[in-house]
Image (cartoon, rainbow, N blue to C red):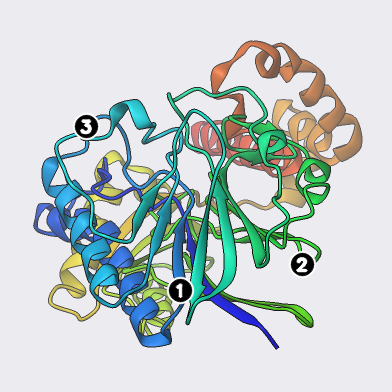
């Protein structure tokens, strides 16, 4: 049985800035920035330990035109370690690191192949004189590539597995620019054995076999929209068996975003205890991570609602929680969003004969209300660039939050 083992990774975004977080705890700024390189170092270590036949990197090694020479040297250092272990690396440029933006002053280590942006190229990988596989790839010449690069891949008739290395948006994946767009069928019809894809920041197997079509996702989260494990794929292709695709976590810093129910709390101490307990739950799962960045969303009905809504409350709570976890290993950084509600007797308010009663009864007409909200928001979704932040939101959830905000203002004023 012929087998070919390799690592497929993408979207390293080495030296990516972590905007917004550094201002909270400046001492962690360097650790956050270093995490993207640490994740790549884990990939190199995995490749050496597993004695893979190759490492494939499907674009966006760097974050943009502002990459530093230090970042490029760190990346080169990892490739050099692979080269010294006789593990070849294959790289394509993506939209964040198109070939017209890379440094021309660095010599890359022996065994490093960077694909051209002019045409699809193919290179063999051999073991003991026998060709195991052919790696096909093409790079982005510039940031915005709107042509279908997938249809340019043509399989040769030579012996060995055929693997396509491509940075692309397959099937108009949501949340990412539609660069190098193609369909799943474009890739299936190629008669390749595996497609190593980049661009989408989440591990996804679009097709398991014949061919396997896989997004490895990014290797390190950089903000709260990239929650969930991040890593690479350790892949084994066999001539007479299905592909074995193993996802391996490589992130140095974990990002989580979760809710903390503070219903019924009557003191700030109780709120702090609820926050601390939630963070400690996640801390137990960080055996392979350097740090944790947690966005906690406080919810629930509490008599502390008005106090928590004060402009300085969130900042004070964040400072106190981060002080509680100061010196922990792994290190912990907490950010808070307060979405609590006041304590009201909803039934009594609904039975009233005033505007508050009308508002509450309207909110109970869920289906009709949601239809009205969608119709009212239609012009916004058609013209507003920020619509992507609301497209995945639940209209019912939005209407309930709006109701509670109104109650905070209306009921509070009536009781004053």
Label 1: few (<14), some (14–19) or many (≥20) C-alpha neighbours in 10 Å: some
Question: Residue 76's quadrant in the figure?
Answer: bottom left
- Give the CA separation, mark 3 to mark 2: 37 Å
Question: Residue 137's quadrant in the figure?
Answer: top right
Closer-to-camera residue (339/193)? 193
Q: Is residue 261 visible?
A: no
Across and down, in percent, residue 401 comes to 62, 41
Across and down, in percent, residue 111 comes to 32, 61
- Give the CA separation, mark 3 to mark 1: 27 Å
Label 2: few (<14), some (14–19) or many (≥20) C-alpha neighbours in 10 Å: some
Q: Quadrant of the N terminus?
A: bottom right
In the image, 213: left or right of 247? Answer: right
Q: Earlier in the sequence, mark 2 or mark 1?
A: 2
Give SS at disc 2: loop
Residue receiving disc 1:
249
Residue receiving disc 3:
66
């Amino acid at each position: 049985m012929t087998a070919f083992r390799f690592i497929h990774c993408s979207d390293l975004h080495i030296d990516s800035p972590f905007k917004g977080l550094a201002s909270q705890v400046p001492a962690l700024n360097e650790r956050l920035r270093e995490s993207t390189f640490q994740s790549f170092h884990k990939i190199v270590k995995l490749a050496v330990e597993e004695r893979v036949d190759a490492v494939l990197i499907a674009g966006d090694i760097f974050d943009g035109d502002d990459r530093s020479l230090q970042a490029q040297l760190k990346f080169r250092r990892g490739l050099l370690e692979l080269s010294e272990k006789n593990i070849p690396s294959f790289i394509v440029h993506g939209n964040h690191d198109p070939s017209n933006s890379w440094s021309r002053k660095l010599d890359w280590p022996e065994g490093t192949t960077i694909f051209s942006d002019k045409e699809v190229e193919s290179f063999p990988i051999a073991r003991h004189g026998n060709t195991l596989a052919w790696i096909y790839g093409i790079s982005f010449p510039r940031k915005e590539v709107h042509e279908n690069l997938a249809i340019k891949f043509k399989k040769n008739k030579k012996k060995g597995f055929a693997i396509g290395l491509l940075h692309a948006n397959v099937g108009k994946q949501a949340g990412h620019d539609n660069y190098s767009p193609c369909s799943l069928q474009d890739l299936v019809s190629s008669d390749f054995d595996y497609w190593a894809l980049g661009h989408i920041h989440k591990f996804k197997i679009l097709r398991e076999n014949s061919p396997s079509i896989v997004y490895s996702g990014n290797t390190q989260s950089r903000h709260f929209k990239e929650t969930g494990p991040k890593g690479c794929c350790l892949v084994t292709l066999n001539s007479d068996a299905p592909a074995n695709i193993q996802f391996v976590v490589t992130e140095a810093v974990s990002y989580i975003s979760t809710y903390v129910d503070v219903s019924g709390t009557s003191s700030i101490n109780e709120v702090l205890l609820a926050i601390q307990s939630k963070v400690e739950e996640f801390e137990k799962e960080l055996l392979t991570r350097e740090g944790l960045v947690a966005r906690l969303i406080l919810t629930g009905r509490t008599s502390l609602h008005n106090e928590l809504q004060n402009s300085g409350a969130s900042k004070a709570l964040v400072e106190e929680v981060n002080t509680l976890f100061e010196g922990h290993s792994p290190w912990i950084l907490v950010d808070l969003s307060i979405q609590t509600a006041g304590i009201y007797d909803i039934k009594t308010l609904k039975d009233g004969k005033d505007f508050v009663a009308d508002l509450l009864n309207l909110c109970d007409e869920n289906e009709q209300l949601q239809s009205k909200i969608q119709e009212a928001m239609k012009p916004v979704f058609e013209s507003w660039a920020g619509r992507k932040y609301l497209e995945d939101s639940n209209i019912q959830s939005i209407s309930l939050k709006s109701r509670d905000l109104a109650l905070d203002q209306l009921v509070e004023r009536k009781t004053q």
